Image (cartoon, grey):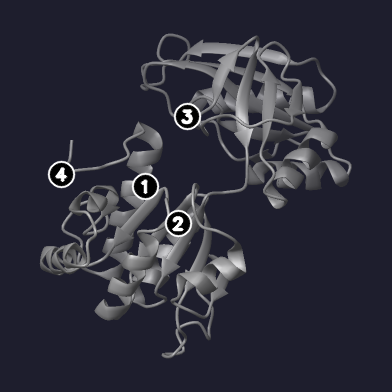
Amino acid sequence: MSLFAAVLSELSAGRGVALATVTAVGGSTPRHLGARMAVLDDGRTLDTIGGGKIEHEITTAGREVARGGRPRQVRHHLVRDLAMCCGGWMELVIGPADPVVCAGVVDAIATRRPRVLTTSTADGAMALVDRALPTRAASVHDGALHELVAAPERALVFGAGHVGRALSPLLASLGYEVIVCDDGDTGALDAGVPGASRAIDSFAVADVERALGPLGAGDHAFVVTRDHAVDERLMGELFERRLDYLGLIGSLGKVGRFKKRFAARGVEPSRWDDVHAPIGLDVGAETPAEIAVAIAAELVVRRRRGQRRVGGWEPR
């Protein structure tokens, strides 16, 4: 939803802006329901609806709308109509950007007050509704696309060492609000962490919650510290929160020892069923950069395929 902040800035500068929104798809397509890009009156674009000939056509039509032309609906089979190789079809609506709605979207995200954005499939007219959707998934009904407008999901990276510093910018690029937590004893936070919007100088979950509020739905925790004892303590504290994602770095041997120790303390073994340990997809990662990619890839699978658990993985 950061696109709306950029659009609002262009509107404030007196430029005409059209918004092109994907309202229906079928088969193999480069982007999916709710994907959106802005087209300025000078032909410049913000974001993408997939590139290729479809984006070229949308850019041409969007520039006309941005200059005051009527809203447009576009529907193409990507192979038959445009000779693209994707194999599916896309339907889009192009309408003028509304500064009031754009400002409302930006405000809803900044204040962490969820709202629903509706986009008419007929003319692209947008409106905000003061209610929340049960999921973040977009849907089309009653002649409009319905999307949840909410603050980005939070990613709490415990550990600002090699893996944490490689992981944070990747998570930020995926749209997460990244908060890095470290005790600061090694000076890991002194130079800042790329991608992190905030740093908290503590490994204690209680300190993190004093700074951010209670952890729960929408929060993702990544335990990647330099100290196994700290990892173990953090896991004990994070077990008590119902997070969307909890991952622990380490070998199968380390994870096995942790499970035995927690079982001796009375923690049900089934509690580990929702923990991603070892963290990330099993792609043979070794370096911090590779481990960060494996973790980010796991999150993409969860987001795009709706899989809460991602088991063994093989290239397809």
Judged by depth in the image, the label closer to the viewer, 3 or 2, is 2
Q: Is residue 242 visible?
A: yes
Q: Which residue is mark 1?
A: 299
- Within 10 Å of the Cα at label 3, are there few (<14), some (14-19), or many (20+) other Cα atoms? some
What whole-number distance in Å separates the C-alpha atoms at marks 3 and 2?
20 Å
Place of residue 311 in the rendered image (x, y in percent of width and height, measured from the top left)? 19, 43
Q: Which residue is mark 4?
A: 312
Q: Which residue is mark 3?
A: 31
- Within 10 Å of the Cα at label 4, are there few (<14), some (14-19), or many (20+) other Cα atoms? few
Indicate the secondary structure of the residue bearing disc 3.
loop
Residue at coordinates 78% horizontally, 39% vertically from top-left?
104
Judged by depth in the image, the label closer to the viewer, 3 or 4, is 4
Residue at coordinates 75% horizontally, 16% vertically from top-left?
71
Place of residue 154 in the rendered image (x, y in percent of width and height, measured from the top left)? 52, 55
Looking at the image, residue 285 lies above or below residue 25: below
Horizontally, is 33 left or right of 233 in the view? right
Indicate the secondary structure of the residue bearing disc 2.
helix
What whole-number distance in Å separates the C-alpha atoms at marks 4 and 1?
14 Å
Do the residues bearing badges 4 and 2 touch, measured as CB atoms within 8 Å? no
Amino acid of disc 1 = Leu
Looking at the image, residue 140 lies above or below residue 132: above
Q: Residue furthest front?
A: 266
Q: Quadrant of residue 92?
A: top right
